[in-house]
Image (cartoon, grey):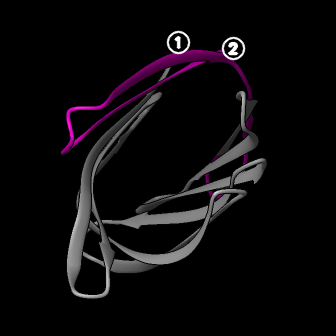
Amino acid sequence: MKLRIRTTDSFGENYDATFDATKEDNKIGVKYMYSDEYAKVKIFVLKDKVQILRNGDINSNKLLKENQKTSFSYRASYMSRNFEIFTKSLTIEEKKIKAVYSIIEGNSVVNELTLKIDEL
C-alpha cells in the first residue's frame, strides 16, 4: 500500500511525499510503517489520538490529541530538544488523518503545522 504525507507550516514550508508502507489493523487501531530518507516511521492511529514515532538519523516521538498539550522530543545530529505540542484539531477518518497543531518551546509557539496523511 501507499501512504501520502503532506505538511505545511507557518514558515511556508511544504512537504508532500508518497511512501510504500505496511498497515496493521487490530481491535484498538491501525499501525502504519514506512521509511523515509531520515528514519523508520511508525504511525499509530487510535480512536482519538495519533502517535508518530521516528527512529533513525532523526528520532522523535509526537502524540497528537485534540485540544490537548503533549510533550514532543526531537533528536538529531544537529539538534536535541524537548517541545510541547498543542493539537488544535484532529480528524481521524477511514484512510485519512488531518491534524493542525502548534509546536511550543517554553511559552512561545515556534511553528504551526497542518499534517495530512492519506492511505492510497
Q: Secondary structure at mark 2?
A: loop
Name the residue that disc number 2 marks.
Answer: 1
Which is nearer the eye, 110 or 100?
Answer: 110
Outermost residue toward the bottom? 106
On the image, the x and y values in percent for residue 84 come to 39, 77
Q: Which residue is mark 1?
A: 120
The location of residue 62, given as percent across then percent down, is 53, 63
Marks 1 and 2 in Cβ contact (< 8 Å): yes
Check disc 2: other Cα within 10 Å, few if <14, some if 14-19, many if 20+.
few
Outermost residue toward the front in this view: 78
User: Of label 1 and label 2, which has the lower sequence position?
Assistant: 2
Question: Which quadrant holds residue 14?
Answer: top left
Q: Quadrant of the N terminus?
A: top right
Asked if 24 appears above or below 63 in the picture, the reply is above
Disc 1 to disc 2, how far (Cα)?
7 Å
Quarter of the image for residue 77 reads bottom right
Q: Residue sitting at 46 percent across and 59 percent down? A: 47
Q: Is residue 6 magenta?
A: yes
Is 62 located above or below residue 107 in the figure?
Answer: above
Characterize the local packing of mark 1: few (<14), some (14-19) or many (20 or more) Cα atoms within 10 angstroms. few
- Residue 46, image x, y percentages: 53, 57
Residue flagged by tag 1: what amino acid is it?
Leu
Looking at the image, which residue is at 70% across and 46% down?
42
Residue 104 magenta-highlighted: no
Q: Is 66 left or right of 20, judged from the image as shown?
A: left
What are the residue bounds of the magenta stretch? 1-30
User: Looking at the magenta stretch, what is its main secondary structure?
Assistant: strand
How far across and how far down the image is residue 48, in percent?
A: 40, 62
Residue shown at 70% from the left, 28% from the top: 36
